[in-house]
Amino acid sequence: MSEQTFYVTTPIYYVNDVPHIGHSYTTIAADVLARFWRAQGRDVHFLTGTDEHGIKIVKSAAAREMTPRQLADDVVVHFQDLWKDLNIANDDFIRTSQPRHEQRVQALVQRLVDQDDIYEGRYEGWYDEGQEEFVTESTARDNDYKSAITSRPLTRYSESSWFFRLSKYVPALIEHIQAHPRFILPEARRNEVLSKLALGVEDLSISRPLEKLGGWGVPMPNDPTHSVYVWIDALSNYYTALGMPKIGDEFDGRCERFWPCDLHLIGKDILWFHAVYWPCMLLALKIPLPKTIFAHGWWTAEGKKMSKTLGNFISNDDIRHICGTYSRDVYRYFLLRAVNFGSDGDFSRDQLQLRYNAELANGVGNLLSRTVNMIGRYFDAAVPAVQDDVPEAVAVREAAEALLRGAAPAMELCQFHVYLDLVMDLVYATNKFIDVTEPFKLAKDAARKGRLATILYTCAEAVRIILGRLAPVMPETARRGLGQLGLDESAAQGQADRWGLLAPGTAAAKGEGLFPRKS
Ligand code: MSP
């Protein structure tokens, strides 16, 4: 049987400014999924990158007296550095200004031209430069001719343009969405897209005069005076990064295995592009559609919309500061723990501190140190074998089995909050088990050593399972914790993991606390 694959992507980020918490959110979520499925034995491909063309970049570059390429070369490093600092293990990083991408975008557009899905017309209307989005008259009017996202005034355009026959593919798209409940997640977003589609969709202007972009863009293959619309260029990255369509003999057959993509992770503001433009383009090209597009919510900071003027903007430097105070694993944990994935959420330093103390220091850290300490003291630092029956242990085992059973289904649906709830349920059940059974009291009575052995085996086994599940979210913390139980990650992950795999006799060695106190 061929190995199961998992291909996950983040949006490719604009290089007009440095990364912030929103970018880190999607990228961390994708990294956690990639690590989880890798540990489950899937062949994973995790792609991220940067979106470097378009008027937005051209204007930002001009404002800084740089060329767009200089700006892109400068800013891309901030993204790459932040991903390193957040321990992101992507397999590839695509930049839309790379020749490998540009030539394949042209090949895709040429195919659309050849099959008469692209025609010449005239675009008259509004454009949202912040979003790189064409806006209809009625939407423009409803928003007072301002961007619904950035509130900046819309730009008026009247120019010749090439159009993609988007409307021709909308009926097939609607059918696809209806037949595939997991194509757009969460469900509320899927309904939103379906309602908007029902209102009717016009063909899409997919080119801009290249001179208006100072030559910065992918030329239309049929008309080099025009550049491919930045969203058509950008969306194609998910396919071109795999080396497709094939050009010459540089094609790496391994990549073909990853299409159709399993998951495009995106923010809610860019759902329409991903759920309508991209699939219609693929339908036209007869390329299979991605399996799932998941749109997550937006972060505010300290109760307000993030903005540089309000001073609550959480930039790459702020993220590094938070990671320095706690750790990068704690930051990763908090982002996925504090908010249901799919909903909006607020980043608050007080909340981070509270969760750090309650869940990580007093929860996970305390459980590990109590367990390792007692095994050290009462069993010469070797995990004991189960001896007497301890009825109270059933609750721990049940929580562990609920976690083992529920982990993959939660990850299938990007429900990190459900996943981490299951982890914390086991943490609480095991800490409670220690409080109830009071193993430190049993130690004084030699006749009760059999009961003590079962209790400590149960704790150690629970800790192994907890740290194994935390590993995709908190890779370094989990490695350190498992090390104290004499294990590496491979002993705590994988599809075949089940209760009871911890071998008695494993050497437990007390180490530094996983979560030092912070005031
Ligand atoms: N370049 C396009 C994407 C092209 S994908 C083919 C783009 N780039 S972006 O840099 O502006 O934004 C990338 C992502 O960051 C989006 O998914 C967006 O939702 C996300 N976020 C931007 N601000 C955010 C928050 N405040 N909170 C959460 N995510 C946010 O769009």
Image (cartoon, grey):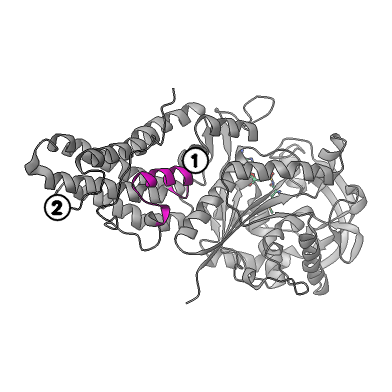
Query: Which quadrant is home to the C terminus?
Result: top left
Overall secondary structure of the magenta section: helix
Secondary structure beneath dot 1 equals helix
> Marks 2 and 1: which is nearer the front?
2
> Is 355 on the left-hand or right-hand side of 235?
left
Residue toward you, 488 or 226: 488
Q: Quadrant of ligand 1?
A: top right
The picture quadrant where one finds residue 82 is top right
Residue positioned 73% across, 63% down in the render: 166
Could you say where residue 24 lies in the image, as x and y percent from the top left? 60, 42
| Mark number, residue 387 | 2
Q: Which mark is residue 171?
A: none
Look at the image and say whether residue 395 sits in the magenta stretch. no
Pinpoint residue 239: horizontal percent, then vertical percent: 68, 64
Numbered tag placed on residue 329 in the rendering: 1
Direction front: furthest residue: 380
The residue range painted magenta reads 471-490
Q: Residues within 10 Å of mark 1 (few under 14, many from 20)?
A: many
Label 2, residues with CA under 10 Å away: few <14, some 14-19, many ≥20: some
Alpha carbon of mark 2 to alpha carbon of mark 1: how far?
Answer: 36 Å
Mark 2 or mark 1, which has the lower sequence index? 1
Where's residue 177, x and y in %?
Answer: 57, 63
| Residue 58 as seen in the image, left or right of residue 11 | right
Residue 129 seen: no
As rendered, which of 82 and 353 lies closer to the eye?
A: 82
**Residue 355 picture quarter:** top left
